[in-house]
Every structure is written in structure tokens, then in C-alpha cells.
């Protein structure tokens, strides 16, 4: 009998304001070993799109369905995953701005993130990454992201605490005793 095990990985992603601008992601197992560490330059792309591109590249690099803890210093990425994605999907990739539905920024990349959620279970955490020393995980604020349409869990979008936690505002604070090597 073969039992399929869903791996749990940390996906650290960030944009690097350099010349040319770069995106960077690191996939780590729970022991803190780097599985994949990728950086690439994208000329003509910067800011929020570059931050989101780091996430997309990381999600698309994962070879099998996985439970992911996405760690990003980007408020744009974290809030999009936690609060926007489900509404945007329901509203055909638009959001309400001053009473009018307008297209969201970077809809093509958000749709790629949404497609990845059909395969992966995502949680979101905020943590600063240093481009010099690499990612570390000590104490992260973690929140789960509702799955995309077409996945097994069709529950409505809502924030759910991850693991043993105590409530802190809208997110759950979870102690994760994992440290990455540089």
C-alpha cells in the first residue's frame, strides 16, 4: 500500500530593487534545508508586479501538490492572498473603486496564483528576508488562504488559524521553530 504524503514547504519570496530589478524565491523544507533558491532579473518590471512575480515563479516551480507557508515582506502580496483573491475571482478579476468595478492590477499574475491554489494549500506569513543572509523563520504570523475554485474544499473564504495558536487581530500568531541556513 502506497500512502501519498503532501510535503510542507516554506516559500520565501521578495522583490529586489536593483538595476536591473530582480525577483527572488526560496523553497525550504521544514528542517530549513533549501530545496530551491532562484533569483532572476526582469527589466522593465518593478514594484508590486515584481513582488507578485516572485510568488508566481515560486508556486510554479513546485513539482507536486504541497502545503505551503508563503513568507513575504510584501503587504501587497500578503493582503492580495488573504483578502482580495476570492473577491476578485468572484467579480471576474475586478474590484470596487468608488462605486465602480475596475480591473485589478496585475490580473494575469493573480490568475496564475489562483490556478496554483487548485493544487496547493497556502498559508501566508509576514517576515522580513535579508538578501544578504537569506530567509529565516522564527516566529511568523500565519493565516490560511481559501482554496481556488475547482479544488476539493469549496468552503467560503475566511481566515482560519493554523495549528496551535492564539488570536492576534485578524491573523493567528504561530511559533515555528525552524531556522534556515544561509
Image (cartoon, rainbow, N blue to C red):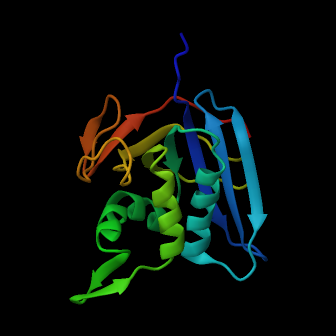
Q: Position of residue 40 (x, y in %)?
A: 77, 63
Q: Residue furthest top?
A: 1
Q: Residue at x 45, y 64 (%)?
A: 75
Q: Is 81 placed above or below 121 here?
A: below
Q: Camera-side residue: 47 or 80?
A: 80
Q: Horizontal placement of 153 versus 13: left or right?
A: left
Q: Camera-side residue: 118 or 164?
A: 118
Q: In this rendering, does residue 74 appear at all?
A: no
Q: Residue at x 72, y 73 (%)?
A: 21
Q: Is 92 placed above or below 85 here?
A: below
> Quarter-wise, where is residue 178 in the image?
top right
Q: Position of residue 20 (x, y in %)?
A: 78, 76
Q: Residue at x 45, y 49 (%)?
A: 118
Quadrant position of the C terminus in the picture: top right
Q: Horizontal placement of 130 versus 3: left or right?
A: right
Q: In this rendering, does residue 48 appear at all?
A: yes
Q: Camera-side residue: 27 or 154?
A: 154
Q: Residue at x 31, y 42 (%)?
A: 153
Q: Camera-side residue: 26 or 112?
A: 112
Q: Position of residue 68 (x, y in %)?
A: 51, 41
Q: Horizontal placement of 52 versus 45: left or right?
A: left
Q: Position of residue 163 (x, y in %)?
A: 35, 30
How many badges with numbers are in the image? 0
Q: Is 46 placed above or below 80 here?
A: below
Q: Is 14 placed above or below 163 here?
A: below
Amino acid at each position: 500500500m502506497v500512502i501519498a504524503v503532501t510535503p510542507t514547504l516554506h516559500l520565501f519570496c521578495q522583490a529586489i530593487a536593483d538595476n536591473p530589478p530582480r525577483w527572488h524565491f526560496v523553497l525550504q523544507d521544514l528542517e530549513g534545508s533549501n530545496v530551491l533558491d532562484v533569483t532572476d532579473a526582469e527589466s522593465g518590471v518593478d514594484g508590486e508586479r515584481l513582488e507578485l512575480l516572485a510568488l508566481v515563479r515560486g508556486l510554479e516551480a513546485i513539482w507536486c501538490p504541497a502545503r505551503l507557508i508563503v513568507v513575504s515582506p510584501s503587504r501587497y502580496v500578503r493582503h492580495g492572498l488573504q483578502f482580495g483573491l476570492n473577491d476578485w475571482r468572484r467579480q471576474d478579476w475586478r474590484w470596487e473603486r468608488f462605486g465602480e468595478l475596475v480591473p485589478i492590477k496585475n490580473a494575469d499574475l493573480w490568475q496564475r496564483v489562483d490556478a496554483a491554489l487548485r493544487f496547493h494549500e497556502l498559508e501566508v506569513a509576514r517576515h522580513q528576508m535579508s538578501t544578504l543572509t537569506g530567509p529565516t523563520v522564527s516566529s511568523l504570523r500565519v493565516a490560511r488562504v481559501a482554496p481556488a475554485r475547482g479544488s476539493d474544499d469549496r468552503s467560503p473564504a475566511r481566515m482560519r488559524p493554523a495549528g496551535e495558536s492564539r488570536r492576534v487581530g485578524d491573523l493567528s500568531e504561530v511559533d515555528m521553530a525552524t531556522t534556515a541556513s544561509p
